Amino acid sequence: MQTQHSYANDQQGKLYLVPTPIGNLEDITIRAKRILEEADYIAAEDTRTSGIMLDRLGIHNKMVAFHKFNSKEKAPELVKLMQEGATIAEISDAGMPVISDPGYILVQECIKSNVPVVPLPGPSAFATALIASGFDGQPFTYYGFLPRKASQQRPFLEEINASRATSIFYEAPHRLLKTLEQMLEVLPGGRQVVCARELTKIHEEFIRGSLEEVIQHFKEVDPRGEFVVLVSPNTEEKPLDWADLVKLVKEQVAQGVSKKDAIKQVAKSQGVSKNELYDRYHQEGAK
């Protein structure tokens, strides 16, 4: 067990997780800008992309590259710097660090070494898309990027099809239509979908409609920009399992209905075999 007091020792090195704008530079917070200005180092997923953004903000602190190809080797080096008193601000290319980037590896190493990890609130593409989707915001499931191969996508799509929560994932423009068509092999064509692109930018767009309608749209209009795809919850009535059906029979029997009539009524109302329900009921009774 471990308890972290983020600000108990201001002399101690820290890791700040600093969100950056997902498109509109005005979305940088006052606190995020201050932390970036004061940090000894800025760990960036892509120093070139982040360098352009930081330059526009007037921030010229030393950057170190921290990405999926060097994260395991680089994390101990950065932790050592923080143990020696350095403050490091970790940023993603856009949005929240750790969300769909390798930042969690540095967070894990900090936790192991008792280096405080201080998160800042801020922009996130999937949360921004969710609140404007029109779907219920709770519960929701965020998948990041789905696997590229159709065979590997299918288990996720089956899970999304059955889910009672809003499902969210990211997709690249050149794969969007193929992924939507793969979804149609698993999900009903009438399932509601939202594809959000260019969030917070001048060309921000939300394409809302049934899965079939959205597929048709992208057959006529080439997808451009990175997409957040949201799928509405499955609102179909969940079929009762045999244990539930036996429980219904027992409830009717408790109310004075004969076992024979109770089994007949429940089987008819739920569209199941009367003989199988009879067997299940007596198997349950034998336990």
Image (cartoon, rainbow, N blue to C red):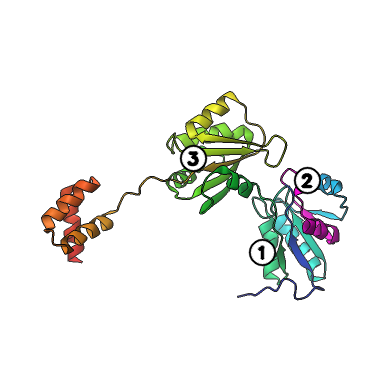
Q: Are marks 3 and 1 in contact (CB under 8 Å)?
A: no
Q: State the residue position of label 3.
A: 151
Of badges 2 and 3, nearer the viewer stands 2
Tell me where the magenta segment starts and ends, as one range.
22-49
The amino acid marked with disc number 3 is Ser
Separation of marks 2 and 3 at Cα, in angstroms: 39 Å
Q: Is residue 123 left or right of residue 12?
A: left
Mark 2: few/some/many CA within 10 Å (<14, 14-19, 20+): some
Q: Quadrant of the N terminus?
A: bottom right
Residue 116 placement (x, y as % from top left):
72, 69
Find residue 228 and report its horizontal and vertical position in percent. Answer: 60, 42
**Residue at x 61%, y 47% (from the top left corner):** 126
Give the percent coordinates (x, y) of residue 204. 67, 37
Mark 3 → mark 1, Cα distance in angstroms: 31 Å
Label 2 amino acid? Leu
Q: Is residue 39 magenta?
A: yes
- The residue singled out by tag 1 in the image is 108
For the residues carrying marks 3 and 1, which lies nearer the camera in this image?
1
Residue 46 in view: no
Residue to which mark 2 is pinned: 25
Residue 55's place in the image compared with 214, above or below, is below
| Labels 2 and 3 touching (C-beta < 8 A) | no
Image: 14 above or below 252:
below
